[in-house]
Amino acid sequence: MADIKKLAEEIVGLTLLEAQELKTILKDEYGIEPAAGGAVMVAGAAGGDAGGAAEEKDEFDVILKSAGDKKINVIKEVRAITGLGLKEAKDLVEAGGKAVKEGATKAEAEEIKTKLEEAGAEIELK
């Protein structure tokens, strides 16, 4: 049997792009559909309190809808925000509809949204 603690540490240490790839593999190859909202394993085991729908939302996903006409500036901002390498950031920006940051606080999400919109991107908060 696998060392569960080690596996959990590896999952928590995934980059955003790696977590997205893991989600795709789990869905396509094993038929496992992660929870709605696209919050992949980044939020991890902190969940469990899904009954708070009536409360004000305190975690947001920053979704890059499109890079606009200043794609290079958007790639630079995505790299600064996520810590991704150039290729990974470029892939994320070109794919569109991907989460730049998941589980961000309202203030952090608004700050990221502002930075990316100033760079020319179209952003959505979920």
Image (cartoon, grey):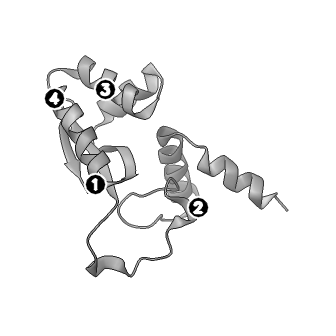
Q: Which mark is residue 106?
A: 1
Identity, as a three-letter code, of the amino acid under mark 4? Glu
Of callouts 1 and 4, which one flags the residue occurring earlier in the amino acid sequence? Answer: 1
Instruction: Identify whether 58 is placed above or below 25.
Output: below
Callout in the foreground (2, 4): 4
Q: Which mark is residue 58?
A: none
Question: Which SS class for mark 1?
Answer: helix
Q: CA distance from mark 2 to mark 4?
A: 40 Å
Identity, as a three-letter code, of the amino acid under mark 1? Lys
Of callouts 2 and 4, which one flags the residue occurring earlier in the amino acid sequence? Answer: 2
Assess disc 1: are there few (<14), some (14-19) or many (≥20) residues with their C-alpha within 10 Å of its C-alpha.
some
Q: Which mark is residue 30?
A: 2
Residue corresponding to mark 4: 118
Of callouts 2 and 1, which one flags the residue occurring earlier in the amino acid sequence? Answer: 2
Q: Position of residue 8 (x, y in %)?
A: 68, 56
78 displayed left or right of 118? right
Instruction: Identify whether 34 is placed above or below 62.
Output: below
Callout in the foreground (2, 3): 3
Q: CA distance from mark 1 to mark 4?
A: 18 Å
Residue at 76% across, 60% down:
4
Residue corresponding to mark 3: 77
Identity, as a three-letter code, of the amino acid under mark 3? Glu
